[in-house]
Amino acid sequence: MLKKLYHWMLEKAAGPAAVPVLAAVAFVESSFFPLPPDLMLIPMCLAARRRAFMFALVCSLASVAGGLLGYGIGSLLYETAGRWILDFYGDADVLYARFQEAFQAQGFWLVAMAGFTPFPFKVITISSGVAGLNLPLFLLACFVSRAGRFFLEAALLYMFGEKIRSLIERYFGLLTVAFFLLLLGGFLAIKLFV
């Protein structure tokens, strides 16, 4: 089933409704859909490099809006829809226990880091709602991480085209960790020197 969804997304990325479908995929991926919008964003950016940043913006805004839906599922519907979605990605009780304490202590950073990585973002958005993470802080973390991720991809694809595609796909996890460390280092430098 996932393979069919993947091929459907690639087909839509080349079609006339690519932008609305990209927005829809980015929206639902943040709350329950299993495949990331990057699968559409990358070929769309390669096909129309001058529009890469517009695609990244659409993807970012739709992903944050979908994150709000995920937050709502966790906050209002955890025992029904939320538990079912989290069980799809692992044991909901284990995920809940693991993240509950972390969200209370470091919610912003957890959302910001996870939103930038290949980790299923819907687990984070639903868990944020369950934990009652401060909503404006949650939305800020979502936007920072998702926009950072999608704009970085768009920038690399805009500058390097097809050459960078295989590198992104092969080393995305490592690139994510490196970018997050740079971002964290920047925040620490600002805190220490300003």
Image: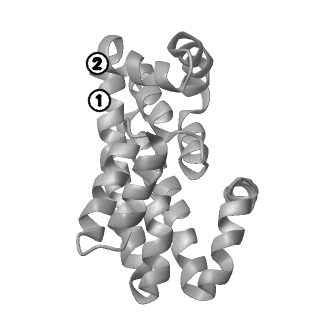
Q: Position of residue 163 (x, y in %)?
A: 67, 82
Looking at the rendering, in which quadrant would you find the C terminus?
A: bottom right
Looking at the rendering, in which quadrant would you find the N terminus?
A: top left
Q: Position of residue 86 (x, y in %)?
A: 46, 22
Res 77 label: 2
Q: Position of residue 51 (x, y in %)?
A: 38, 83
Answer yes or no: is residue 190 visible: no
The one nearer the camera, 11 or 82, is 11
Q: How is the image coloured?
A: one colour
Neighbor class of circle 1 (other Cα within 10 Å; few <14, some 14-19, many 20+) is many
**Residue at 34%, 10% in the rendered image:** 79
State left or right for residue 61 relative to residue 2. left
Q: Is residue 187 above or below residue 125?
A: below
SS of the residue under disc 2: loop
User: Residue 129: which quarter of the image?
Assistant: top left
Q: Position of residue 167 (x, y in %)?
A: 71, 70
The residue that mark 1 highlights is 72
Q: Is residue 73 above or below residue 53?
A: above
Q: Amino acid at mark 1?
A: Gly
The span from disc 2 to disc 1 (Cα, nearest Å) is: 7 Å
**Residue at 39%, 40% in the rendered image:** 33
SS of the residue under disc 1: helix
**Residue at 45%, 29% in the rendered image:** 128
**Residue at 41%, 28% in the rendered image:** 126
State left or right for residue 76 relative to residue 29. left
Q: Amino acid at mark 2?
A: Leu
Marks 2,1: beta carbons within 8 A: yes
Answer yes or no: is residue 95 visible: yes
State left or right for residue 32 relative to residue 157. left
Who comes first in sequence, dot 2 or dot 1? 1
